[in-house]
Amino acid sequence: MSEAVVNKAQVSSTSCSYCGAVLSGGHFCGTCDRIQPVASSADYFAFIGLPRKLRLDEAELEKSFYALSRQFHPDYFMSASEAERRASMERSSMLNDAYRTLRDRVARAEYLLSLEGYKAAEKKAPPDLLEEVFELNMQIEELKAAKKMADEDEIAEAAASLEDALAGLRAKLVEIDERLFAQFEQWDSVFENKSASGEKKIVLDRMSALLSHRSYIRNLVRDITEVL
Amino acid sequence: MPVIELSMSGLPKSGRVVGIDLGTTNSLVAFMGEKGPEVVRDESGNALVPSIVYFDDNEDRLLVGEEARDRLITEPRKAIYSVKRFMGKGSADVQEDLSAVPFQIAPDSEQVIGFQMGDRVFTPPEISAFILRDLKRRASKFFGEEVTQAVITVPAYFNDAQRQATKDAGHLAGLEVLRIVNEPTAASLAYGIDHRDEAIVAVYDLGGGTFDISILKLKDGIFEVLATNGDTHLGGDDIDNRLITLIIEELEQGPFKGAAREPVIFQAIRKLAIRAKHELSASDHASLEIYSPGQPGGEYNREITRNEFAALISDIVERTLGPCKQALKDAGLNPEQIDEVVMVGGSTRIPLVRNKVRDLFKREPHVELNPDEVVALGAAIQADVLGGGRRDLLLLDVTPLSLGIETMGGVVAKIINRNSTIPASASEMFTTWVDNQTGIDVHVLQGEREMVADCRSLAKFTLKGIPPQPAGLPRIEVRFLIDANGILTVSARDHRTGQEQSIEVKPSYGLTDEQIEKMLLDSFEFAEEDLRKRQLVEARNEAETVIRAAERALAEHATRLIDKNEREAIARALGELRLALTGEDYVLVREKVKALDDASHHLAEIIMDGAVLAALKDRKASEVAEG
């Protein structure tokens, strides 16, 4: 876990705000044991004490979450100084935000991309679906029109073909997720081997593309479900 | 027994934190005892204080609980009940509720409801504060020291404004509210404290006015809420209303035509309906009888069966199932994955409710806990944690509703999703639209819907004092933090300068700080009156103890131990104290108690010395015997 040690330096500022001791980078001062405010540069992986890898043991993550909750929670700082109470609140909320993000595989990948300087994935249609998407949008409009006219036959026909399409899109989502999670292994090995930045970028680009396809299809699924 | 008892000169402040269940129908207070959480009971053994406040404008008389409930029947215009339904709401929110209660609403009730009681207007936090103060007094009396810190429970599905209103009520009652805890979560604490195995627990809480469902994971002393859902407008009151409507409709066809909605008759009907509801939980039929001797044929008498009742309320009970399914979905669980179902709230005594819950979760729900007390007991456990009493338990609760901000076109952008563990935070970057713009308006909302109009407005903020710059250049980072009470705080920072940004907050619902300050002053008036009465009662009790002790000492020892002058001084002090007791001046009573104390001090010392000597003698004898 050498990466974690390196990352820890970002979790807090450099000296204790109470006793002035030099901080080793933990959540608490090593000298006076008081809880420290969160540095703005802290990232979720480092905060929980994890390397910036995508495959993680969810049971272990939960264990860390519970253990850190027991250390930070405002319940245990009711009679502490105002600054410590604030630090406890900051650390608890950051821990909760971090846990929520990291325990979900997709959110974890999106977060990693944002850490690596990628912007939030724009919704982009996968190239192999472009024609289908065009067709689907037509069908959605047709169904809406049929509903307006209360044309039962038209409604049934349009709905049936949209139902079919929906099943196809859901299958596509499963496929995209599989491809995305396959990239997790790639990323972890690139990360562990401290590979050249070019290799890193290849993996990150792939994940970014998959995520933007994913969110596009999810939107489409939502739109279709709404009209149905 | 020595003559002098330590006088209780004002209660010492206690470090004790109590747990309070501020309910729609009943409220109660609990604490952590030696062997576990306990509820505070009065002399007659009652723990529940009916959440009813009576106020008589002419006499400035305020009654809470049982006494207020008695007046509800005779003077319905002067009593407020089910005030919890009005917490954190404006008049537009509660039209339906208002049609079911005979309360008069004051003008200017858009942001905070005001109940008109004679010349005075009370807001829901003030009415709740009267109830809380009664509980505070009970607890203080019970401990013999003043209780100033409390944990207060609220329905899990309460929004920000409703939570804030509850906190305000505590503040008005002179309590430091250490934490607002969700009722089902508190109940899970009381349930889970003895069940330490890992388990997924669903808490189904159907109270007097609100419904909550919470799904928790219990593991190693951590109580992690996975999902919560509910309806803050669904409870025993709605069930009562069905019966009330039935009775009124039938009465209107008979001799009570036109009279059934008279407040006095209405309250009698309400009482009858509630009693029948209770009976139908134990028996398969109940009788509804109203008899008015003055009226010819003034009789109403009918029987209602449990099945009839079930049919009457089945859609209400059905409405609780939607939130249950949503909570399961949000937690990513099937009903089969729930290990235990815990029933909380008085309405879960209704057999139909138990049946529906059993059918949904496919298991027998736990009904062994007293559904009226379990929330307060859980609150007492959390109070103990916050008071530093224990660190083995930890509650990780969630926010029940998504938090969002208004964006272009009246659409709400979610920034913190529902069921996020709290404390939870989110940061958003704001900028200007036109050159040299110095302020940015931010509108914060709570709810699950897409459009601003369908969500609950929490507050509007103005980010002020932005230095004039070209449009889009300023970068103001606004941080939204939902604290462990589920209450939002907002701070802003200019991203370029790192300076804190000033924010002007306009809460959409609820009281401003100035209003609360004013109310604190107002309630002081009542407090003075209450305090005076309490002081008098305490001084009288104390006086009686001292009188009894002095009389006994005089009778048993005085002729032997002290001279005539001293005897006479004691007798005189006794006489003066008795005289003071005929009046209502507690200061005078205190004074005379002290005078009697002083006069009999010497005698007490002699008696004490004698007792000590006697004790020493006994001990020596026994030591000798042992040696």
Image (cartoon, rainbow, N blue to C red):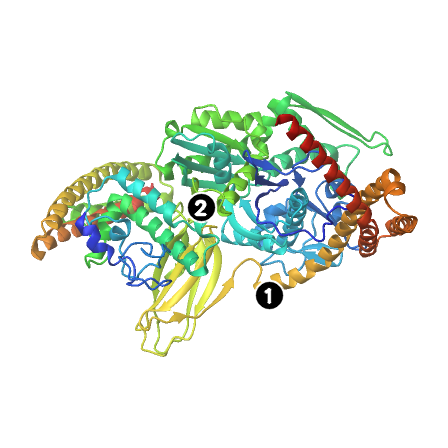
Q: Give the total number of marks visible in the rendering.
A: 2
Per the image, the residue denoted by label 1 is B514
Is residue B299 visible in the rendered image? The answer is yes
Q: Relative to A182, say whether B454 is above or below.
A: below
Type of residue at label 1? Glu
Is residue A227 in sight in this rendering?
Answer: no
Kindly identify the residue that appears in the image at 81 percent across and 49 percent down: B602
Q: Quadrant of the N terminus of chain B?
A: top right
Q: Earlier in the sequence, mark 2 or mark 1?
A: 2
Mark 2 and mark 1: Cα distance apart in space: 29 Å
Give the letter of the chain under mark 2.
Answer: B
Say if labels 2 and 1 share a chain: yes
* Residue that badge 2 annotates: B400
**Residue A142 lies in quadrant:** top left
Assess disc 1: are there few (<14), some (14-19) or many (≥20) residues with their C-alpha within 10 Å of its C-alpha: few
Residue B513 location (% of width, % of height)? 57, 63
Q: Amino acid at mark 2?
A: Pro
Q: Residues within 10 Å of mark 2 (few under 14, many from 20)?
A: many
Left or right: residue A148 compared with residue A58: right
Q: Above or below — where is B387 with respect to B515?
A: above
In the displayed structure, does residue B453 sit left or right of residue B309? Answer: left
Q: Is residue A61 above or below residue B168?
A: above
Question: Viewed as shown, does residue B363 lie left or right of B523?
Answer: left
Residue at x 24% of width, y 36% of height: A167
Residue B161, position as x, y percentages in the image: 52, 54
Disc 1 secondary structure class: helix
Q: Quadrant of the C terminus of chain B?
A: top right
- The residue closer to the viewer here, A68 or A173, is A68
